[in-house]
Amino acid sequence: MPFVVDASIALSWLMPDERDESVDALASLLAEGAALVPDLFMHEVRNALVVAHRRGRIERDRLVLAASKLRQLPVKIAEPAETGEVLDYALMHDLSAYDAAYLALACRTRLPLATRDSALRRAARLENVPVLP
């Protein structure tokens, strides 16, 4: 089953202190090559890993390992959304432009959205987008 995956889910796969069983179940779908991401995905996850390192959550070697694993995730990068589309979703649902890009992609492709972000989950439901996990 194809789905859109956001950075919060990827971080759950990459950061030991964020793992849980519900997200692990999505990893099997990911292995099938079914995940679609917006073009900002890699940068957003890398930034979150750097922030985790700066805050002392992970050591530098763990950061490097996680960044390497990130490059190996079998995700397909989608064409960028129209600026107006992202801004509309951001303003309508009080989301960051980053989160709105995931919502726009899920709406455009009519795929479920995998996220742990509560505001993004709420916005997806309001747009009739199925939410995982």
Image: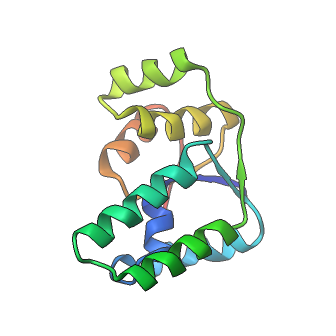
Left or right of 61 on screen, residue 4: right
Residue 43 in the image: x percent, y percent? 51, 51
Left or right of 19 on screen, residue 28: right
Residue 127 in the image: x percent, y percent? 48, 31
Q: Residue at x 47, y 58 (%)?
A: 45
Location of residue 129 with respect to 74 vertically, above or below: above
Left or right of 131 on screen, residue 16: left
Residue 70 in the image: x percent, y percent? 59, 68
Residue 8 in the image: x percent, y percent? 42, 60
Q: Quadrant of residue 39?
A: top right
Nearest to the observer: residue 104 or residue 55 = 55
Q: Quadrant of residue 109?
A: top right
Nearest to the observer: residue 69 or residue 33 = 69
Quarter of the image for the N terminus: give it.
bottom right
Instruction: Identify the coloring.
Output: rainbow
Q: Which residue is drawn at 47% across and 63% down?
A: 9
